[in-house]
Image (cartoon, rainbow, N blue to C red):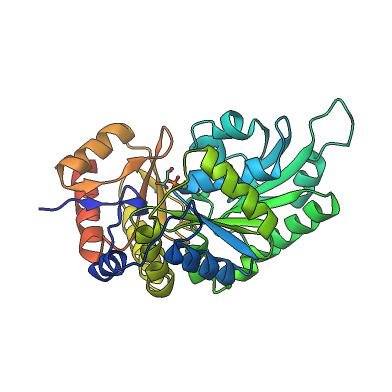
Amino acid sequence: MRPSDFRSDTVTRPTPEMLRAMVEAEVGDDLLGDDPTVKRLEALSAERLGKEAAVFLVSGTMANQASVAAWCRPGDEVILEEGSHPIHFEAGALARIAGVQIRPIPGRRGAMDPVDVERAIRPDKTWHSRSSLLVVEQTHLGAGGAILPLVNLQALREVATRKRLRVHMDGARLFNASIASGVPPRDFAACADSVTFSLSKGLCCPVGAMLCGPADFISDARRIRKAMGGGWRQAGYLAAAGIYALEHMVERLAEDHVLAKRLAAGLVRLPGLEVDPKGAETNVVFVRVRHPMGPDRFLKELEERGVRANAYTLDVVRFVTHRDVGPEDAERALRAAEETLRGR
Ligand code: TLP
């Protein structure tokens, strides 16, 4: 029996229709600038987010890093929420690639207080590093897929503009935020100079992410992408999946959110698990394992019962919903968790 895989929305497979679009794609050489399908995906992405231009990259990590490297000089300081993805899950790339230093700020469900951000911006003195970029994450993975409120993003944007900082939005799950809140993606995107979003998560593409922003910035990011080894050739086969996803896979994210709420409501009733009742705003469920068996054994026993989830921190495990799990997988997960915790 196939496992119920809640480890991440990155495990999603392309649908048969998406695969057909890929096979039938018209391609060229993207690095030479003549892949028509990549060009269409880039234009469509920029248009969806209300930006001038866009570039198609291998991954969300590469998109975030190309953006930071394009906005900053080595030695600059980047302000980010302390639980943000680029700090914890990008293999130290901020230091390795852009050579920037980080200024982590605590947030409330991922949202930084504009007052804290303003206080963290350094005065323009030769002995300080230059505060040049503010990074926000929508949805915020470390806060269990929380949606940053539009008013918070607007207030952060106002501080950044007044203090002459750029804003980058890691919008890996921007469309989840948009579908769950009803706020159009371009309204969130208007709060940032550059925005990334993932194609390979809930949108079900096999690979890929977009970086959108002003045309001159995108042209710098393209050069950095090449320097990172991401200058690809007949990328149109992959871009075709991206176009299909933007046209057909966005609205259905609502189903993932319903499933996450259902899972959270079931897990909260089980002994030894702590689930934030306000959590599960989108497609992520964070569960603190208080049960004496501990998170590692909990996950191992779930796996033996055909249910996969993964560790987020030492005591938090996460379940992520997506197109390739449905209500029957959620029921299976709840049954498996109950049996595991009650020692049956
Ligand atoms: N997140 C992955 C892991 O790296 C944790 C996942 O399974 O959730 N920004 C955010 C907010 C992300 O959640 C991720 C991936 C990325 C950027 C990076 O995207 P990729 O994996 O395409 O490099």
Please count the marks in the image: 0
Q: Quick check: can you spot residue 300?
A: yes
Q: Quadrant of the C terminus?
A: top left
Q: Residue at x 43, y 66 (%)?
A: 37
- Percent across and percent down for residue 342 are 21, 43
Residue 36 vs 298, above or below: the answer is below
Q: Residue at x 9, y 53 (%)?
A: 1
Camera-nearest residue between 43 and 188: 43
The answer to whether residue 84 shows anywhere in this view is no
Q: Nearer the viewer, residue 63 or 53?
A: 53
* Coordinates of residue 140 in the picture (x, y in percent): 54, 52
Give the image location of residue 299, x and y in percent.
27, 39
- Residue at figure coordinates x 67%, y 59% from the top left: 215
Residue 168, how many percent across, how many down?
65, 51
Residue 235 falls left or right of residue 12: right
Q: Can you name the residue that lies furthest to the left here? A: 1
138 sits left or right of 73 in the view: left
In-front residue for pair 344/16: 16
- Residue furthest top as drawn: 127
Q: Where is 144 relative to 191, above or below?
A: above
Residue 313 lies, with reference to residue 264, above or below; the image says above
Q: Residue at coordinates 70% horizontally, 41% vertically from top-left?
A: 79
Along the viewing direction, whichever of 221 and 336 lies nearer the viewer: 221
